[in-house]
Amino acid sequence: MLSLSELRKLRAHREYPSVSIMLPTHRTAPANKQDSIRAKNLSKQAIDRLHGEFSKREVAAVVKNLEGLVRTQDWEHMLDGLCLFAGREKADAFKLPFRVKPRVVIDETFATRDLVFTMNRAPSYLVLVLSEKPTRLYEAWTSVLEEHKVKPFPMIHKSRGGASRLPGGKGVNPSAVRDQSHREFFRTVDRAVAALQSVSRRPIILVGVERYLAFYQEVTTNMESVVGMLAGNHDMTSPSELGKLVWPVFQSGATIRRSKALTQLDHAAGAKQSASGIDQVWNAAFEKQVRTLLVEVDFEYPADVTPEGDRLLSYSGKGARSLDDAVDEVIERVLSDGGEVFFYPVGTLDLHRQIAAVKRK
């Protein structure tokens, strides 16, 4: 299973040449008997292209890593797709739960579009479990939860009503003190969540008893990111069990978010705050202006890029500035700048020439 941290590392990779191979695979025999042969053929295609541009010595490490990936796969236990990534010092393989088109990409970055699509079809999201002992944050993909343990998470309520005793004495309302203390604690939690959202904005599922959910909603500045809630005490619920409970809650909210993105695009177009077509979208991404990117699933656009990086030129197929798919690069840039990406069926964005963006205000 691909983790969010692994995807971030792949997206951060910069080195030319970097080889990406995608191919459809099969879960069962006899169809899976041909998977290794297809992988070898695509690998040979990539190696021939490398040797056409570099000396064998220059790309020996890349070729070795690529051949090693093909050789070491467990071809008897595949899913519906496979991605292979090879550089001079990096070699990774990831199985995908949906079919991909066979292709070879040689570029400065790895072609992570299919992985991003996987994450978008089953997008990454946050699960915030509100509690005083402690409040935990999970990064989630489908029903798989990975606890975020970077400070300040997990967060323990140490003030009154939490780790500290409530005050007593005449005229003191312990319940009011406890409630206000919880509000302050959840306001601190919300600030920590906001810091993460400023780097990479993701939808959020809130989990907790109804009182905690109410307090958090009172103080949060991130309510627009909340797409669902699960009421109940889940302090002792395991991540695997909690994942099964929150995934259906998230699914209903994800469909709504894709529809809302289309509505936002219509409004942005009317306000002249949108970009349509690959050339306009490329320039908007270059200027870090894209808040939301919308793209059809099968849209690809090979192109060269100017030395300044601001415009696309006719595709030559040679050198680091020749992109096998400029769409993949746009996706990378938008995500790196904290934007969102949504994928749609073919024909959905005909009026926008298959790709569009909502610009930042």
Image (cartoon, rainbow, N blue to C red):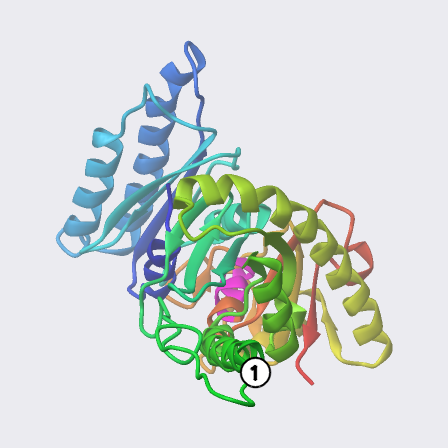
Q: Position of residue 339 (x, y in %)?
A: 57, 70
The type of residue carrying mark 1 is Asn
Count of marks overlaid on the render? 1
Q: Position of residue 109 (x, y in %)?
A: 37, 61
Main SS category, magenta section: helix
The quarter of the picture where residue 38 lies is top left
Residue at (21%, 50%) from the top-left corner? 62
Residue at (47%, 50%) from the top-left corner? 234
Residue at (38%, 46%) from the top-left corner? 2
- The residue sitting at the left extreme is 57
Secondary structure of residue under mark 1:
loop
| Residue named by callout 1 | 173
| 154 left or right, relative to 309 | left
Above or below 144: residue 335: below
- Which region shows up in magenta? 326-333
Check if residue 252 falls in the magenta segment.
no
Closest to the observer: 259 or 327? Answer: 259
Closest to the observer: 314 or 91? Answer: 91
Question: Which of the image's four quarters has the N terminus?
Answer: top left
| 80 left or right, relative to 152 | right
The quarter of the picture where residue 286 lies is bottom right
Judge whether residue 265 can be spotted in this image. yes
Above or below 214: residue 284: below
Q: Position of residue 334 (x, y in %)?
A: 54, 70
Judge whether residue 143 can be spotted in this image. no
Q: Position of residue 272 (x, y in %)?
A: 81, 81
Mark 1 is surrounded, within 10 Å at the Cα level, by few (under 14), some (14 to 19) or many (20 or more) other residues, namely few
The quarter of the picture where residue 340 lies is bottom right
